[in-house]
């Protein structure tokens, strides 16, 4: 469970956001959408505990696993060594991961279908593969809340589909509470129960996904026309949210 | 899947080969070094002399050879090895917690603080104990100053730490210059200058113990923190989000590093570049995992400094300051390693 009450963050004189309120129940998935610079990443980091809010408070129940938007790895660690670092909260000061920690790391890699990556060098992996490893590291911490910052950015369509598919499966299997940011309304539509639209410093809309992901709201959010197109896919009608660039 | 014991993987078996090689090299280096010098002793005699300590051997060597090997060379080689191992461990730990290959023990100000402490002790007294005490005390003081400057709102950013280290080093270097300026040019000044250049010449078993204890303690702490250093090397934010107590972890490592560096400076003066080059070189052999990197760096550092000291004491009739040789070797080797690593994508993208 994540409860955000009256959250506000200030950068020097300017408010990045103010009066953010929402409660994400256990086992639910929420997506945050909004233009660049509206404080999506800042909000996530405040919930994770990496940044301090100027006002308001955040309450979370359960261990948080965090997948950052980008990580610049200074050292070329083995994938298994990186995933086992997800066990850091379970390993005391002056101690090292035990056999069971390595087993959990390997099982998590297997679960995501990348068991064969264990001995590969992280910095030599592709973008999609790295994202899977980062998700594996978060899951290896045995988190109950998973927070992801643009997990599909900079990935091609097939890798986007891969990440979305794996997230959907893991979330339902483990009953995780998930909060993620994205720039793709369709990804939110695919995964999220609820959506937070960050319009500006003083205005945020929180509501059920199908109520938030409408033509009018998305157009107001981005200032770009967005059309909801009904398309037929293998005998089912699905709605595609398409931005129009003129 | 089956349960995998991480100690029986191919990687672990490759490592066994590495340890065997490094330990054999270290043993061979010690035996070789005990024999060479202005008074040469054959390797077979060196081995016999050493075995004579534990076995009832009939002496086939001259008493003077035994004295040279056991009372003069052995403590010196011990100190050189300890200093090399300590500096390499300190450097490996610092490069990990600062996520930067250009960091060495000098960066957090300990070396310059210890240099001033030692120089001041030489100025005011003849006592070896005072020298070691002062070097240690001022080394720690310099680190606390760095800590004080860099800490803002309860946190210390890496950039501030490095900058504070540079500022503090500059200040203590000025104090060293003042000490030299007021020193008696016939007597104290040369003593200070030669001590600062770095030397293992005045070695004894007492001194080996004095440097050995802090080096061993500091290195033990660093080794126990090997996993935490791994996590910290991902960056502060990542480490914190993984649940590591970032500040506390970093300061435990820094204090251990300060302990090691101050002890080495106290015993042997400023021996630069070892803590920078050796961990870098070791990482190429072992990869970045500090579990393997730290002990490998220790062994390579010991082997390296023992041989550097061989050159210092046995290459020409006079004694060459060790610090000069390590800098002459270290700078170009480091430049080469840096270029090689850059081609292999060592750094972040």
Image (cartoon, helix red, strand yellow):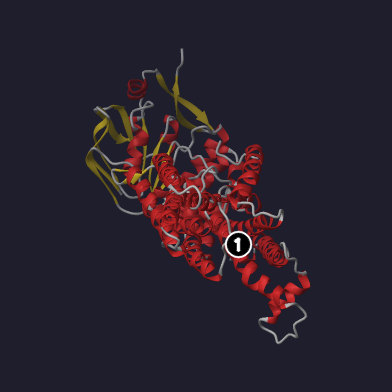
Residue B254: give x, y in percent of width and height: 43, 53
Residue designated by label 1: B81
Numbered disc 1: what chain? B
Residue B88 location, quadrant: bottom right
| Vertical position of residue A27 compared to residue B300: above or below | above
Residue B243 shows in this picture:
no
Decide if residue B132 is on the left or right side of residue B347.
left
Picture quarter with the C terminus of chain B: top right
Residue A21: give x, y in percent of width and height: 24, 38
Are there few (<14), some (14-19), or many (20+) residues within 10 Å of tag 1? many
- Considering depth in this image, is B29 or B122 the residue closer to the camera? B122
Q: Residue furthest bottom?
A: B56
Residue B34: give x, y in percent of width and height: 69, 67
Residue B164 location, quadrant: top left
| Vertical position of residue B254 compared to residue B345: above or below | below
Decide if residue B185 is on the left or right side of residue B73.
left
Residue A227: give x, y in percent of width and height: 41, 21
- Considering depth in this image, is B182 or B311 the residue closer to the camera? B182
Residue B188 shows in this picture:
yes
Q: Residue, x 78% and y 80% (percent of image)?
A: B60
Decide if residue A57 is on the left or right side of residue A64.
left
Q: Residue, x 54% and y 59% (percent of image)?
A: B86
Q: Residue furthest top?
A: A246
- Considering depth in this image, is B234 or A203 the residue closer to the camera? B234
Q: Residue furthest front?
A: B186
Picture quarter with the N terminus of chain B: bottom right
């Amino acid at each position: 469970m994540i409860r955000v009450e009256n959250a506000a963050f200030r950068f020097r004189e300017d408010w990045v956001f103010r009066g953010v309120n929402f409660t994400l129940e256990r086992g639910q998935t929420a997506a945050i959408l909004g233009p660049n610079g509206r404080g999506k990443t800042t909000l996530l980091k405040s919930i994770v505990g990496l940044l301090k809010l100027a006002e308001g408070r955040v309450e979370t129940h359960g261990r948080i696993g965090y997948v950052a938007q980008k990580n610049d790895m200074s050292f070329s660690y083995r994938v298994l060594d990186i995933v086992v670092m997800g066990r850091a909260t379970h390993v005391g000061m002056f101690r090292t991961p035990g056999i069971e920690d390595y087993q959990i790391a390997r099982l998590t890699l297997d679960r995501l279908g990348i068991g064969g990556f264990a001995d590969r060098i992280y910095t030599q992996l592709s973008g999609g593969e790295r994202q899977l490893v980062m998700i594996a590291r978060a899951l290896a911490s045995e988190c109950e809340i998973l927070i992801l910052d643009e997990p599909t950015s900079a990935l091609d369509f097939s890798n986007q589909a891969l990440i979305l598919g794996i997230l959907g499966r893991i979330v339902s299997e483990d009953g995780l509470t998930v909060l993620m940011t994205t720039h793709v309304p369709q990804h939110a539509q695919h995964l999220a129960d609820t959506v937070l639209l960050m319009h500006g410093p003083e205005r945020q809309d929180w509501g059920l996904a199908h109520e938030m992901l409408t033509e009018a709201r998305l157009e107001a959010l981005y200032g770009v026309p967005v059309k909801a197109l009904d398309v037929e896919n293998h005998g089912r009608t699905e709605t595609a949210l398409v931005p129009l660039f003129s | 899947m089956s349960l995998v014991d991480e100690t029986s993987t191919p990687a672990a078996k490759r490592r066994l080969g590495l340890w065997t090689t490094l330990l054999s090299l270290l043993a061979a280096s010690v035996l070789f070094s005990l024999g060479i010098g202005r008074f040469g002793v054959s390797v077979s005699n060196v081995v016999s002399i050493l075995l004579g300590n534990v076995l009832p051997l009939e002496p086939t060597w001259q008493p003077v050879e035994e004295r040279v090997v056991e009372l003069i060379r052995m403590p010196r080689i011990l100190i050189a090895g300890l200093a090399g191992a300590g500096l390499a461990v300190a450097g490996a730990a610092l490069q990990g917690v600062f996520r930067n290959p250009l960091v060495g023990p000098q960066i957090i100000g300990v070396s310059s603080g210890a240099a001033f402490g030692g120089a001041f002790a030489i100025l005011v007294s003849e006592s070896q104990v005072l020298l070691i005490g002062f070097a240690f005390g001022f080394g720690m003081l310099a680190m606390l100053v760095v800590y004080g400057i860099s800490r803002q709102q309860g946190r210390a950013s890496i950039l501030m730490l490095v900058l504070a280290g540079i500022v503090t080093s500059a200040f203590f270097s000025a104090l060293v210059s003042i000490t030299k300026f007021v020193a008696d040019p016939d007597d104290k000044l040369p003593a200070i200058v030669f001590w600062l250049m770095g030397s293992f010449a005045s070695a004894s078993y007492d001194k080996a113990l004095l440097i050995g204890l802090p080096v061993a303690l500091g290195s033990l702490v660093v080794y126990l923190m090997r996993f935490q250093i791994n996590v910290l090397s991902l960056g502060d934010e990542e480490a914190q989000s993984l649940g590591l107590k970032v500040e506390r972890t970093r300061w435990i490592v820094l204090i251990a590093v300060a302990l090691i560096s101050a002890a080495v400076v106290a015993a042997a003066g400023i021996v630069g570049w070892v803590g920078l080059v050796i961990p870098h070189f070791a990482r190429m052999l072992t990869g970045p995992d500090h579990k393997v990197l730290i002990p490998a760096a220790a062994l390579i550092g010991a082997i390296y400094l023992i041989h550097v000291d061989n050159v210092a004491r046995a290459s020409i009739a006079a004694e060459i300051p060790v610090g000069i040789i390590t800098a002459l070797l270290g700078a170009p080797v480091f430049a080469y390693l840096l270029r090689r690593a850059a081609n292999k994508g060592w750094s972040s993208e």
